[in-house]
Image (cartoon, rainbow, N blue to C red):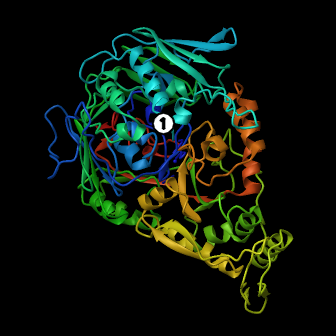
Amino acid sequence: MRKFHASKGLAAAVLLAMAAYACGGSGGPGDTAATTPATTQAPTTDGQTTSTSAPPSTGAGETSGSPDTAAPPAGFTYKVAIFSNPTTDNPWAYFDTEPDVWNQYTLAGTLPSLYGSAFPTFAIVPVLAADAEPPQGAADGDRWVIDVTMRPGAEWSDRSPITAHDVAFTFNAVKDLEMGGNWLAALPMARPDDPQTEEDDTYDGLISVEALDDRTVRYTWSARPGLAQWQFGAAQSPIFPESFWGPHVEAADEAADLYAVSGVAAPSGGSMIYDRREPGAFVRTEANHGVFGRGDVVTSYSTGGTTSEGAASWEVGDTSGEVLARWTAGPHAAAAIYSVYDTQDAAILALRDAEVDFMLNPLGLQRGLQSTVIEAGDLDVIANSPNGFRYVAFNTRRFPGSEPSFRQAIACIIDKEFMATNVLQGVATPLNSLIPPGNTYWANPDVFVWCGGLSMEERVSMAVQILKDAGWTWEVEPQWDADNQDVIPRGEGLRGPDGTELEPMELLAPGPGYDPLRATYSLFIADWANDLGIPLRAQPTGFSVIVDRVFGPVDWDMYMLGWSTTIFPDHLADFFETRADSATTGGFNLPGYSNPEYDRLAQDLKSSTDLEEAAGIARRMDGIIAHDVPYVVLFDTPILEAYRNTLAYPSTTVLNGLQGFSGLPGSVNLAE
């Protein structure tokens, strides 16, 4: 879910490869990690096996026993709690079929990119590229060509050079195996017109990526790429080592064959090396002390600029402001161990009892547990604005989710302010826009809201009218009872415009052990729906189970998840564009929403080269989704995090919190 809970990101969502320069982090809060580099989202599947195809992997990354938590002589061990099981050690799969945030956390910092996202400003900065900013390129006939020069000296952890050939190999592997998911945004490829369809369904994008020599990469586009496609897309996409993955790609008949290969033995080009994985127990990563740029001094400024001094010296943006953070690029920790706990409560207990130093949580620390943490004395609690949202989605491919009036009536009956204030007791902030308010430049505070500000009596009346106007009928029509302040009688025998009777429906939602807020919210939504005569039942379900259901066969009615999104809001396209339908193309359009007008705007957003123009397009798209309601955006909460005060981070003030950069395993240090 880049762009990024199945919170993609989109899921949400900054890409794994967009990790902050020298921070070893990646973007994306939410359950699903959303991703289009720097932009979007995604969720997870159940387990990972090791391929037996030639050449054999050197290890499945699944061993028995406990990790060695003793700090190696060269540094300390960064001990982190997580409370959902990472399902893969294969980074190709993470970007496609297994993009949940728990995989992101543990794979963070293993793959390099040409450009990345600066901590904590999210400015685009060079990683392996020689130019401080992504080159603009130039027209070449009816195509657009961008050449990028790579800095010399960058190496994989096996000490082989990282070259332009690795960049080209990554693109060709994604293209040849027709990978989907976040790859659709990370490497947005051109699409020719399908002669089987009446409409022009071409799509501008990448035609090829070539290595002109060891240090020069040529990107050829069908037209000049927009911000989402280039600066926030392909320029920040991850790079894979051809020396390791090449034979596996060659042996794969389809992407699933490649995804079955363990990535434990793969060389790393980032700050951390994936060492081993014990499913249900832990993941261990080791420091890559040879990572390019280690030892450089990085400085971020309040005006958005960033500088680096050392082997990779550069300056990006306006550096006239105050210093937000200054640090020496790591890794400083000798290893990081991610221990899996059954519940959030168990993870917090481990934090309080000094078993771990930090807890990664896309939802942040529950307010009710703050006192438990603070009482420990050696823990600090921080709060940051989120860049994500939690939502309910409809399956628009089948009745009744295919009826806009059905979705609009549900949206109308949900009283977000009542839920946030009275039920969730001020812990949650009601949201209406697909762009969270913390992402201030892009946020749309005036987005359309169904039944906004109405009382419950008025909501019931309006929801009933929406259905009646669309041709729905009841055997018993719901009525508001002023004396009891409730719906009496409830609706019965509701039938659609064509006379189809509603069958019992399920609303899949995380259980209280994973997220008590969504678990509670789902019960209220189901109750309100039943008032209208909609036979909806809230079904508490494991996070990974929900992800499997909604990313697999389209046998579901409604679900609740969340996305962590990225700064550039191309998740608006990734989540709802027809070409991104998860059931047909493996994209992140989970509801199967299709709207030709919206598709045109999505292409305009992806191809826009002007920030102001792109913002206007994004607000129009936001308004269409708010009206058509494939999603109802519900709420989010401040990201509260706790860490042991023996640790030091470059800064603790950052949109989406430290978890948005996967806890900064490549730059965390011991406090002086």
> Residue 641: x, y in percent?
42, 53
Task: Inspect this view and state whether residue 544 appears.
Answer: yes
> Which of the 4 image quadrants contains residue 505?
bottom right
Position of residue 200 in the picture relative to residue 244 (left or right): right
Which SS class for mark 1? loop
| Residue toward you, 351 or 397 | 397
Q: Is residue 239 above or below residue 68?
A: above
Position of residue 36 in the picture relative to residue 374 (left or right): right
> Which of the 4 image quadrants contains residue 304?
top right
> Residue 383: x, y in percent?
49, 51
**Quadrant placement of the C terminus:** top left
Q: Is residue 191 above or below residue 662?
A: above
| Residue toward you, 401 or 653 | 401
Q: Residue at x 30, y 33 (%)?
A: 272
> Residue 353: x, y in percent?
24, 60
> Residue 343: x, y in percent?
35, 64
Position of residue 66 in the picture relative to residue 100 (left or right): left
Position of residue 32 in the picture relative to residue 357 (left or right): right
| Residue toward you, 202 or 293 | 202
In the picture as drawn, the residue positioned furthest to the front comes out as 196
> Which of the 4 image quadrants contains residue 395?
bottom right
Mark 1 highlights which residue? 179
Q: Amino acid at mark 1?
A: Met
